[in-house]
Amino acid sequence: MKSKKLAEFYEEASSTTKRLEKIKILSKFLKELSENDRDVMYLLLGDIYPEYSEKRIGISNQLAIKAISKATGIGSKQVTKEWKLIGDLGKVAEKLTKKKKQATLHTAQTLTTKKVLENLRKLPELEGKGTVGKKLSLITELLSSATPIEALYLIRTLIGDLRIGIKESTVRESMALAFFPGLDKDGKKKAAKKIQDAIDRTNDLAAVFDIVRKKKLESLDKLPLQVGKPIKAMLAQKVNTIADGFKVVGKPCAIEYKYDGFRLLIHKKDKEVILFTRRLENVTNQFPEVVEYVQKYVSGKSFILDSEAVGFDKKTKEYKPFQSVSQRIRRKYHIEKLQKELPIEVNVFDIIYYEGKPQLDEPFEKRTALIKKIIKNHPYKIVHSKGIITDSEKQAKKFYKKALADNQEGIMLKNLKAEYQPGSRVGHMLKIKPEERDLDLVITGAEYGTGKRSGWLSSFILSCRDGNKGEYLEIGKVGTGIKEKTEEGTSFEELTKELTPYIIEEKGKSVKIKPKLVVSVTYQEIQKSPNYNSGFALRFPRLTVLRPDKSIKEIATPEEIKKDFENQKRNWRYG
Ligand code: ATP
């Protein structure tokens, strides 16, 4: 496919903010794709490979500026000046390419999406000496042949900021509309669910598209779960009381500790153990001890386990909160030292695959029995998660208290007969934890500090995510909870280092930041406020911990915030 055609689609999709319109536009575009264009599916979401792949483009703004400069013959300083003025490097590339084309009457080669992907896919492979120069040539080659509109979207793709408002769910709905137009509303819903299930199982849009475009909905079921490729974890819904929980999951149900740790999905394929976080990141190298526990204490040649890793004090053996071990997920060096300082215990609570057979459709109680059969409990190494099966509220409350006394977050209630649905926030797995006021949000802006904080970003704009529109809405600023020194916890210096590569615009002391870094924030109250475009503001927000294990798709939504706002009012009235 000509890359210009894709760019024109991007343009059309950005011309509306209405979800249904976008779906119509995308479904028309999908119908025009040929078998050879399957990999364009990745480009639609700004990617070059399936979601399960760890290979990302990862080009900095600075390199993009250099490439624009080289391709257009306009100095880097001038490009940077334009960027500060326009605030969007893509638009800068479009403007300067237009200028150049007018000047040279250039007749460049026609770009194809195949060529674009070919060059972009070489970028993450480059390592070592001369990398920057090689990357620059690959990008410049594309830019030199690009028309202005192609340059716009090429640059946005390179810096990971496509801004066309297309998400996985838009692609799913568009596929259903494009290839099953005859279905009634119910039928379309079912088709969309089947497509989503296949996406969640494979994390490969093109593989799903291959089948959907042949209109073979039933064949989607045959797309296999693959050991060694990350799978999206099943997520829980929230209830406030045990009585409500019983009503939803039925009696009796399983009640387990809700561990205050981080999710680890453990794959074993032949002899190899691979560990993934809930955002599909491979963290095997960070946790060599877990690999060892799995090799030693879990029987079976191939399986996928779902678990929560929890930190504990190496002397007292008491469980510690997530924030005390969160750095283990990100740190890539001095692993041995960290392993000794911050030991973790793996608590296995589900099994998704075993010895060649997916376990997704087996009832929860059967899956749990299998876990008990194949894992030998080794406390402070790897164990089955603690749980009971009960229909008694009294027993459930007692267990809840015990979980809290054991420094855990609360309890999970699980329907005994339910299946495992990757990627879904299901009603058959519920979480209950003490009322606390905290939200997971993303940093989308900041201000440089003054005085002893000069040179550091010091006040951070927090945003929630409107999943339907793919937009980020501001809800407040936070500067509290962040430490002056890195040894004391999350520091200004650390945050500045983390966020600098994602700065997309600078004006005076203020910067706009690409939504990437998820943080947990506590607050005293949610207030209505015209100052932020979410319509709400947090009173006394305090940053408690970075959430490297969470993706931006999982942060709080405006609906959840509104609900919390209303609950808080209700609690004041009755509490
Ligand atoms: P929260 O912010 O309340 O911790 P969350 O957003 O991290 O929740 P949810 O899916 O809403 O994630 O809650 C379930 C999470 O709880 C799981 O992702 C998992 O990491 C963790 N967890 C701890 N113990 C268990 C357990 N026994 N069974 C399932 N999940 C558990």
Image (spheres, rainbow, N blue to C red):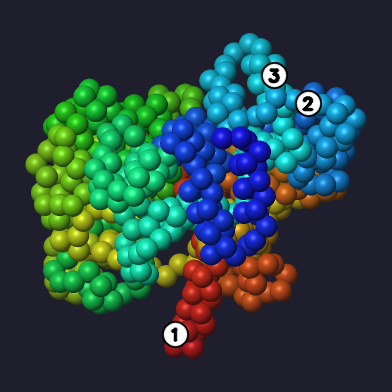
Q: Residue 387 location, x and y as percent?
A: 19, 56
Residue 443 in view here: no
State the residue position of label 2. Answer: 107
Q: Residue 408 location, x and y as percent?
A: 33, 56
Q: Amino acid at mark 2?
A: Thr
Quarter of the view holding residue 390: bottom left
Q: Is residue 433 above or below residue 203?
A: below
State the residue position of label 3. Answer: 137
Left or right: 93 in relation to 314:
right
Quarter of the view holding residue 202: top left
Q: Amino acid at mark 3?
A: Ser
Give the mark nearest the N terminus, 2 or 3: 2
| Marks 1/2: CA–CA distance | 73 Å
Residue at 54 percent of width and 49 percent of height: 29
Mark 1 lies on a secondary structure that is loop
Residue at 66 percent of width and 12 percent of height: 130
Residue at 24 percent of width and 31 percent of height: 268
